Image (spheres, rainbow, N blue to C red):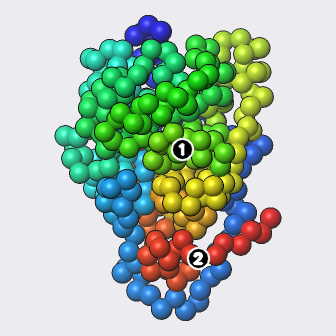
Amino acid sequence: MTETATEGRKIDHVNIVINEDVNAKGITTGFGSYHFEHDALPELDMHSIDLSTTFLGKQLKAPFLISSMTGGAAPTEEINLQLAEAAQALGVAMGVGSQRAAIFDPSLASSYQVRRVAPDIALFANLGAVQLNYGYGIEQCQRAVDMIEADALILHFNALQEAVQPEGDTNFAGLLTKIEALCRALPVPVIAKEVGNGIGGKAAKRLVEAGVQAIDVAGAGGTSWSEVERFRQHTQAGQGIAATFAGWGIPTTEAIKQVRAALPTIGIIGSGGVRSGLDIAKAIALGADLGASAAPNLLAQNKGGSDAVHAAIAAIIAQLRISMFCTGAADLAALRQTPLYRVS
């Protein structure tokens, strides 16, 4: 793929997520089907509730990740810097978008480099796992980590997106052996992440056995990347094929439950349609360690820059704190033991 085509696709993705309805169709995250039991006598000072946690050795003030979104085109540099400013101020984690563009063209590296505004955050590099079948190896993955001074590398798995993307890379054969070699060689942890169709228990177990140290389930019910790619198709046939899969995937809540059941001690990020601190509370009660979202932060940044991102994430943290207060959970360990009731 040419440099121009890669940069153009990055800009396409941002504009489509901001301007079009790319929510999953006919499927939900499942968060609406779960409810906590209200505790009328929590015996807590709400402002003393401890939201802090450690993830892959990094301390966070709250269990939240600004999920991987963008980079690789000149207009995206300001987006990433403003997201990172909010992450630094609030003490949460951040992942950058796929760094493939900057591996191809190092002049684009600055669009991912945010340490100058966020020196302390847990920061995750990002490459598509399938690129291990298209000439990428340990060297390119290390370059991605070094490029942004990352604390871990996300390998994203996007089989459906690649399948419906006009220029998609669809050879996923034999990836597991290459992932195992990468995990052995890379000096930072590897996180396996889907992009909105979910990682289930069986796939997660195979990935962890290969050396992956955390799973971002990125379940179905939020942004659908088959819908994003539908807007990039130039033929009715291509649009129709992509539209078929707008409801495809493992709902986020189901993915969290499956992965936790299969892997009782692995780090889990609950993402995919997370839209509130209450969603994050439910994700943690179901087995996740962190909650994460992408599109809402991008939409906030587009409306009001880093201040708007800060306000949006601060509201999520406040909602999480209230959820814990009203269930009597003084810290995240207690929240993990708080029962959820399925109502539909």
Q: Residues within 10 Å of mark 2 (few under 14, many from 20)?
A: some
Judge from the rendering whether residue 77 lies leftward or rightward of residue 320; answer left or right. Answer: left
Front residue (pair 63, 228): 63
- Tell me what residue is drawn at x 69 percent, y 49 percent: 251
Judge from the rendering whether residue 95 lies leftward or rightward of residue 156; answer left or right. Answer: left
Where residue 186 sits in the image (x, y, percent)? 34, 35
| Residue picked out by circle 2 | 338
Q: Quadrant of the C terminus?
A: bottom right
Residue extending farthest top? 2
Image vertical order of residue 286 relative to residue 133, above or below: below
Say whether disc 1 or disc 2 marks the residue closer to the N-terminus: 1
Where residue 343 sits in the image (x, y, percent)? 77, 69
Where residue 224 sits in the image (x, y, percent)? 64, 36
Residue extending farthest right? 344
Query: Mark 1 is on which residue type?
Result: Glu
- Tell me what residue is drawn at x 67 percent, y 21 percent: 164
Query: Mark 2 is on which residue type?
Result: Thr
Where residue 330 sits in the image (x, y, percent)? 45, 80
| Residue picked out by circle 1 | 209
Q: Nearer the viewer, mark 1 or mark 2?
A: 1
Residue 199 marker: none
**Which of the 4 quarters of the picture holds residue 52?**
bottom left
Judge from the rendering whether residue 34 lies leftward or rightward of residue 103; answer left or right. Answer: right
Say if residue 271 shows up in the picture: yes
Image vertical order of residue 11 relative to residue 5, above or below: below
Judge from the rendering whether residue 195 lies leftward or rightward of residue 181; answer left or right. Answer: right
- Tell me what residue is drawn at x 26 percent, y 17 percent: 107
